[in-house]
Amino acid sequence: MPERPAPFDDVLPEALRFASPAPLVDIGANLTHESFVRDLPAVLGRARAANVTTLILTGTDREHAEQAVAMARHYADRGLALYATAGVHPHDASHWDGALETAMRELHRQPEVVAVGECGLDFNRNFSTPAEQERAFEAQLGLAAECGKPLFIHERDAGARMAEMLRHWRDDIGDAVVHCFTADRETLYRYRDLDLHIGLTGWLCDERRGHHLRELVGEIPLDRLMVETDCPYLLPRNLPAKLKGRRHEPALLPWIVREIAHWRGASEETLARATTATARAFFRLPGEAAGHPTAPGATQ
C-alpha cells in the first residue's frame, strides 16, 4: 500500500504558494485520507488561494466514498466546489459482492457523486487477483451504464486488458477518464482510439520515472486532458523548495499545470483554461465555481 505521508506544517513555504492564472479543477484529491483530518480547513483555504476552485474527492471504497459525499455537503458554499466519486479500487476488488453493489448504486444516485470509480485494473501489485479485479470492474462498468455517469478509472500494468474490456462496453458507457496516467505511447493510443480522457499528475515531475510522459503530453488532445494531484500521494519531486513532510495537497496543482504546459509548449493560462473547461464538461459541473467564470472565453 502507499506509504503513509509524514506530518505536514500548516503553512506552505513562500516559494510553494502558487496561484494559477485561471481557475483549476483537481479531478483526483484523496482528501478523506487520515493525513488531512488535522488541518482540512487550512488545506481547502490554501487550495482556494492557489485558484484551485473545484475538487473532485476520490471514493475508493464504500467508506471513503461516503466520507467524500459528506465532506462535499459539509463544505458546500465555503468558497470551493467539492464533488465526489464512488467506486471500489482494484486493490479492494476481492470485497465486491451484492451488498457492496447495492451500496454503490445508492451512492451513484447522490447529486454530489459525479463519477463511478475509482475502479479498474492494477496488475502491478495484485492485492486482489486479476480475476477478482475484472469481476469488480465489469460490475462497475454495468453500474456506469445504468446511472449514466462518467467513469473514473485506475489502470496500472493492465493497459491491453483494460482497453479490451472498455472496447466491449464502449457503446454502453459515456465518458471515461484514465486517471493518473503513467503508461507508454502504445497504451495512450489505445485509449485515444477509445475516445477516453487522460488525467495527469505529478508523476511527470519525477526525474526517476516520469521522463517518458514529458514526450507524450503533446500527443494527448487538449479536449481530452485533465489535471490532478492524487494527493496526498505523488508529491512532485522537482518543487522549487523543500517541503517538510511528504504530503501532497491541491494547492500544489498549479505547479503540475506549469510543468505540463512547459512540455506541451503552451502557456500556463491556456492549459489551465482548457483543462478546466474539459473537466467541467466531463463531470457535468456548473459553468461557474466560487464566483469564477470558467466557460471557454471567460475573463478574470
Image (spheres, rainbow, N blue to C red):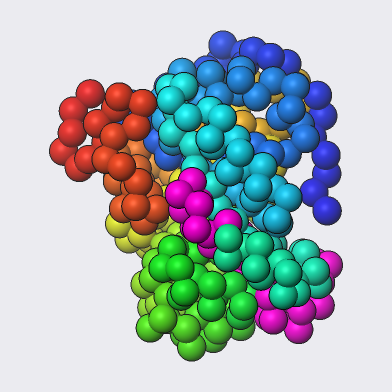
Query: Residue at left 49%, top 64%?
Result: 151
Asked if residue 116 shows in the view, the reply is: yes
| Image x and y of residue 172, in percent | 41, 81
Q: Is residue 228 above or below residue 48?
A: below
Q: Is residue 146 magenta?
A: no
Asked if residue 200 shows in the view, the reply is: no
| Image x and y of residue 236, in percent | 62, 37
Q: Which quadrant is home to the C terminus?
A: top left
| Image x and y of residue 167, in percent | 47, 85
Q: Where, by quadrant of the figure, is residue 4 drawn?
A: top right
Q: Is residue 107 above or below residue 130?
A: above
Q: Where, by quadrant of the figure, is residue 87 drawn?
A: bottom right
Query: Residue at left 43%, top 55%?
Result: 217
Q: Where, by quadrant of the figure, is residue 257 drawn?
A: top left
| Range of magenta residues | 107-136
> Along the horizontal axis of the image, is 208 left or right of 286?
right
Residue 19 vs residue 71, the one in the foreground: 71
